[in-house]
Image (spheres, rainbow, N blue to C red):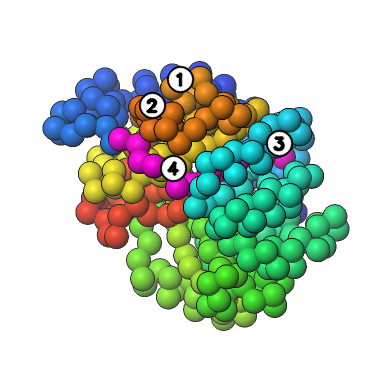
Amino acid sequence: MTPPTLAPTLSPLEQIGLLDAALPKPQGFTQSLAARGQTPPQRRPLRVLQLNLGRLCNMRCGHCHVDAGPHQGHTLMNDAVVEDCLAAIARLQPAVLDLTGGAPELHPRFRELVLAGRQQGCQVIDRCNLTVLLLPTQQDLAPFLAAQRVEIVASLPQPDQEATDGQRGEGTWGASIEALRLLNGLGYGQGDPTRQLTLMSNPEGTRLQQLTACDTATWTRRLQELAGVQFDRLIGLNNMPIARFLQQLQRDGHVNCYLALLERAFNPAALEGLMCRDTLSVAPDGRLYDCDFNQMLELPLAGGATVSTITRERLLEGAIHWGNHCYGCTAGQGSSCAGATTAAATASTGSSH
């Protein structure tokens, strides 16, 4: 696979500066909520413990909001933090253990964390780029995931070669299809709730993600006709104006219009299902964040707790850290690591140019 050529990513402080400058202050996220007579949503009891095991990845996708790639081996979670995470799984008792990266499977203790989650009765999610399953060093990875009944949330931007290779590098489509066939052969994508295969799509460019039952039917038909592969569920994620995608917007002169699009498409109903309300995101260094996006912008959880000290009670005491990037999760149908946050969109969508 040939990755796209990418410029160095802006620092978190530079990214926040761009996001703040893109919208006049009255249109800022928290100010906009107040103008609508709404208060920022409050945190709920913890449901999802999301561990970012590092930004090491065998791919380097143009839209990646974590700046992952083969050059990020130095970001892997160290053994001391892994031990703290193992203790936190037992102490916090999350319903869901969500393993992400980078390619989380490339962490040498990935499987140990999977086993720990399963032993605690957690639903375990592997956020998988699909191509990692084909690496020579990972030949037994897919059978391991199937044996442990891990849900695989697999990235596949669109159900066609041109769009997929355009976002993720030449050859990605073919490798992804090969990986999907491997998973189908292990019982994934066949309607078995213990081996669920979820595909995560994202739109091209500055369009919002608006999936319907018709889209699911289209994906099902196209993947069956083109490649003979099946999946269980289709979810979508808006392209977040962070890291590489924000840099693309800056290069094309579209930062302001994309943020304006997100702001215009704000959907109050999306606030109810925001993932930051019941998720704890753990960075590779053990610091804590409300969500994966705040982690990438280095907007930490209030109070200074780490994964070694956090408790369920302490987590509920802190306010969620909001910013203009939060419009990405509240536009249209809403957007999260679990897909849409509303049953249906009530806001307009479209391209910003």
Task: Name the secondary structure under disc 3.
Answer: helix
- Classify 10 Å Cα crowding around label 2: few (below 14), some (14-19), many (20 and above): some
Amino acid type at image mark 1:
Gly
Residue labelled with disc 1: 303
Quadrant showing the N terminus: bottom right
Rendering coords of residue 323 (x, y %): 37, 27
Task: Tell me where residue 140 appears, x and y as whole percent.
Answer: 81, 63
Out of 89 and 69, give the one closest to the viewer.
Answer: 89
Q: Is 47 one of the magenta-colored residues?
A: yes
Of mark 3 and mark 2, the one earlier in the sequence is: 3
Q: Earlier in the sequence, mark 2 or mark 4?
A: 4
Q: Secondary structure at mark 4?
A: loop
Q: CA distance from mark 4 to mark 1?
A: 17 Å
Q: Amino acid at mark 4?
A: Leu
186 or 42: nearer the viewer:
42
Residue 46, numbered circle: 4
Amino acid type indicated by mark 2: Gly
* Circle 1/circle 2 CB separation < 8 Å: yes
- Please give the residue where the numbered disc 2 appears in the rendered image: 318
Helix, strand or loop status at disc 2: loop
Please report the bounds of the magenta region as a residue range.
42-56
Tag 3 residue:
83
Q: Nearer the viewer, residue 222 or 13?
A: 13
Element under disc 1: loop
Q: Which residue shows up at 27% across the image and 22% down it?
A: 24
